[in-house]
Image (cartoon, grey):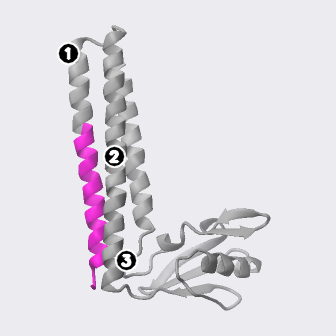
Amino acid sequence: MYDEILLDTEERMDKALDHLRNNLAGIRTGRANPGLVDSIRVECYGSQTPLKQLANVGCPEPQQIVIRPYDPSVIKDIEKAIVASDLGYNPQGDGRLIRINVPALSGEVRKKMVTRIKELSEEAKVSIRNVRRDGNKAADQGEKDNALTEDDRDLLKDEIQKLTNSYENKVNDAAKAREAEVMEDA
């Protein structure tokens, strides 16, 4: 019971951290990055398909994203999806690939991005604390059900708190790294 609760708690905290990292990847920095277009879904073949399933996305230059569709017939659909995405990009297709020039960020936009990073990291911390609460409830329930002794319950709660602290530090580190990238070249 002890190990199950601890493992479940750690797995759920890991998911919260992964979710944060995915969200941070979509935040623009001063450089082009394939993660900037990861969230785009393209209407083709009769369904909404993630862009990364339709094309190879790369960044040959710091200010440019290049999208090479596996099937050139979907280029127009991809361009439409990029324009409709509200990311503010103007795609240019030449029949084989699509280029997106990523404009440099203004100081004001960078500050908004940093604010968004802080919001996302706070959401991740709240999620981690909710997982801690659930783990502590499970520990209390385990003691009530006589599956854990009082000492085991207290040890488990200490372990859960150590995990919480560790994951909150990882969230802070990920957010600080992304903030530094956003503010780079400012």
What residue is shown with label 3? 29
Amino acid type shown at disc 3? Thr
- Note whether 186 is above or below 48 in the view shown: below
Main secondary-structure element of the magenta-colored stretch: helix
What residue is shown with label 1? 151
Q: In which quarter of the image is the N terminus?
A: top left
Q: Position of residue 71 (x, y in %)?
A: 73, 75
Residue 178 lies in magenta, yes or no? Answer: yes
Q: Which of marks 2 and 3 is nearer the N terminus?
A: 3
Amino acid type shown at disc 2? Val
Q: Which residue lies furthest to the right in this view?
A: 46
Q: Could you tell me which residue is drawn at 27 percent across and 80 percent down?
A: 184
Q: In which quarter of the image is residue 127?
A: top left
Q: Who is closer to the viewer here, 160 or 115?
A: 115
Which stretch appears magenta?
Answer: 163-186
Q: Residues within 10 Å of mark 2 (few under 14, many from 20)?
A: some
